[in-house]
Image (tube, helix red, strand yellow):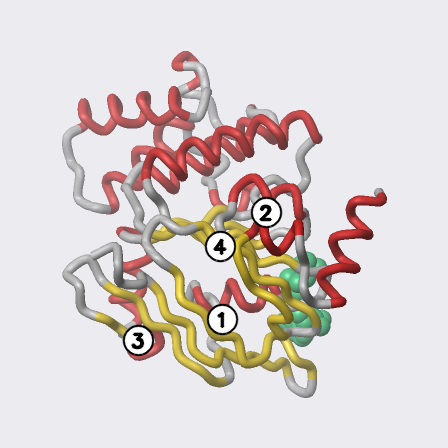
Amino acid sequence: MNDTPLLRVSSVSKSYGQRIGCQDVSFELWPGEVLAVVGESGSGKTTLLNCISTRLLPTSGTVSYRMRGGDWRELYRMSEAERRFLMRTDWGFVHQNPADGLRMTVSAGANVGERLMAVGDRHYGNIRATALDWLGRVEIEADRIDDEPRAFSGGMRQRLQIARNLVTGPRLVFMDEPTGGLDVSVQARLLDLLRGLVTDLGLAAIVVTHDLAVARLLSHRMMVMKDGRVVETGLTDRVLDDPREAYTQLLVSSILQV
Ligand SMILES: Nc1ncnc2c1ncn2[C@@H]1O[C@H](COP(=O)(O)OP(=O)(O)OP(=O)(O)O)[C@@H](O)[C@H]1O
């Protein structure tokens, strides 16, 4: 199975009236592969991520996904119910702001546990034990299980959001600036944790970031966007160490000078 892609994006474009969000983007994502989408503000990263994750209908192009059974489905030809089921069972979405991905007024344990219930787990003891295990994996103390995330620090909230997303064993996770908005030291720890989990679970992921250090640490492959288009794509180390396009060279050198 691993010699077949998981996701196929073909000529995806999205415009907002006259304004281009992203244009003619095509790529394949393989099982276990982490792809970083980088570029400066306004280059179309979020638009692309939203088009692929079915949050935003593309103006043109197709996105196909290989289901667990092995059959390929075009995402925008599925019914809304099928898409929602896929998002709940097979996908995760880690938002930059944890409040967008968590329920802030239910306990940490329930935030993780309700995802298990959504995929059919009904045994309270199992759900609690699994939630506890996942809190441990994201380095949240067991005695915080009944606390609400609004009582957590930003880093803890982000770790809880990650646990909530990964507990159901998704095959594909979308992440939008997963370490944005956190202190640098908190970012480093979170990145380390995320990298360990992604590797252990063999997850495929698409990570949007403007931070090349995040791309370097997390991704195998990188796609550089400018004005809605992909200007360069390749293995992350190659793109960062030996950028071919003038724009990527500028991006890499301007970051290094900071
Ligand atoms: N809802 C919208 N309506 C109109 N134009 C939009 C909308 N969302 C995005 N755009 C435009 O689409 C282009 C791409 O924006 P997008 O948010 O995808 O970029 P980005 O690379 O994710 O930027 P950032 O890193 O700042 O989030 C920009 O020109 C932006 O102004």
Which residue shows up at 35% across the image and 27% down it? 134
State whether residue 112 is above or below residue 174. above
* For marks 2 and 4 on the same chain, the one whose residue lies earlier in the sequence: 4
Residue on which the image places disc 1: 56
Amino acid found under the numbered disc labelled 3: Glu
Whether pointer 3 and pointer 1 mark residues with C-beta atoms closer than 8 Å, the reply is no
* For marks 2 and 3 on the same chain, the one whose residue lies earlier in the sequence: 3
Residue on which the image places disc 4: 35
Cα separation between marks 1 and 2: 24 Å
Q: Tell me the tag on residue 215.
A: 2
Amino acid found under the numbered disc labelled 2: Ala
Which residue shows up at 40% across the image and 51% down it? 33
State whether residue 257 is above or below residue 59. above
From the image, which quarter does the N terminus lie in? bottom left
Residue on which the image places disc 3: 74
- Report the number of numbered marks: 4
* For marks 3 and 1 on the same chain, the one whose residue lies earlier in the sequence: 1
